[in-house]
Image: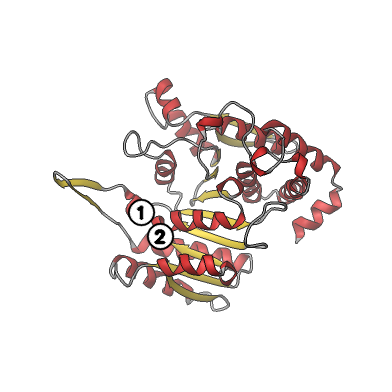
Amino acid sequence: MAYKITLIPGDGIGPEVTRAAVRILEATGIKFSWETFAAGAEAFEKYHEYIPKELTESIERTRVGLKGPVTTPIGGGFASINVQLRKQFELYANFRPISNLPHIPTRYPRVDLIIVRENTESLYSGIEHEVVPGVVESLKIITEKASTRIARFAFEYARKYKRKKVHAIHKANIMKMSDGLFLRCSRAVAKDYPEITYGEHIVDNTCMQLVMNPYQYDLLVMENLYGDIISDLCAAFVGGLGFVPGANFGDHCAIFEAVHGSAPDIAGKDIANPTAVIRSALLMLHHLGEENAAARIQMALENVYRTKDKLTRDVGGSAGTSQFADYVIEEMEALKPAEANSMARS
């Protein structure tokens, strides 16, 4: 029996990096049935819709999606496809694990952070209007339902994976009603998890504290805009957005995605680094319960990163996108099953 997965290759380098990830996933021996759809400008050309009805129906059917980067116009054009998908399928929890890979030089080795971001409201509700010419008002929406739900997700994850601390990140010193509500909900949920240390930090101070000492944090939960900014900041600790995975969880489905841009300037040149979407695919395997396969890819990926010549150009190697996938698959085939099983158990 094959897993049915909705595949959104994206645009720019998206098709190249998702193709590499698909090849690696299939090399595990797990059977996948891919339902492939365009989104964004490419979809509009074909279907006159940025998110085609067929794509929506596929996600409703498969309940699991893997997505490459989709270009979002700045200051005009269509709304972010990422944001639209999150709202449409109530993917309320954005999940971003931050951890180092071998060989990537950074200021902070052995970083292990989890960023949990509320995905459906705050300023990303997109409620804006022009009051008078030259004056635009944007509404920040915070609800008890969404705040409690994301706090519960964060604490449940912390309990399941034995994370020791959860910090709620806020700006309640200024936005006393909206962020104050978020904090009240987080505090109420925290009481149900006495084994987990709960803390609260103001968002601007959090940015400073992270840059000074990221090791003081374990899991951070926050509303939408703060999560967008802080998750990118934390990506810098491990080399940038090209190395971090992303996942969006709802009660009924999940979409796993590379969080970097579509890099149209290098599209079609077979030089893009597919690591972010590969690591996002690993999160998908964990979600599907395929722990051994995920561990096997993880070990193979780390082994490739220990060999400079096997890396892509952005990190000092000479491999192309497809060749990088070849190297990961070769490492997977060289691994003994007992090694991957041992890592999966740990």
Label 2: how many Cα within 10 Å (few below 14, some 14–19, many 20+):
many
Return the x and y of residue 91 as percentages of the image width and height: 46, 49
Q: Is residue 340 above or below residue 7?
A: below
In the rendered structure, the answer to whether residue 173 lies left or right of residue 98 reads left
Return the x and y of residue 121 as percentages of the image width and height: 36, 54
The residue that appears at 46% across and 31% down in the rendered structure is 39
Q: Which residue is mark 1?
A: 121
Q: Which residue is mark 2?
A: 223
The residue that appears at 67% across and 54% down in the rendered structure is 105
On-image quarter of the C terminus: bottom right
Return the x and y of residue 130 as percentages of the image width and height: 18, 45
Label 1: how many Cα within 10 Å (few below 14, some 14–19, many 20+):
many
On-image quarter of the N terminus: top right
Image quadrant where residue 64 sits: top right
In the rendered structure, the answer to whether residue 343 lies left or right of residue 192 reads right
Q: At label 1, which amino acid type do we have?
A: Glu
Residue extending furthest toward the left: 132
Q: At label 2, which amino acid type do we have?
A: Glu
Q: Number of callouts in the render?
A: 2
Are circles 1 and 2 on residues that touch, CB within 8 Å? yes
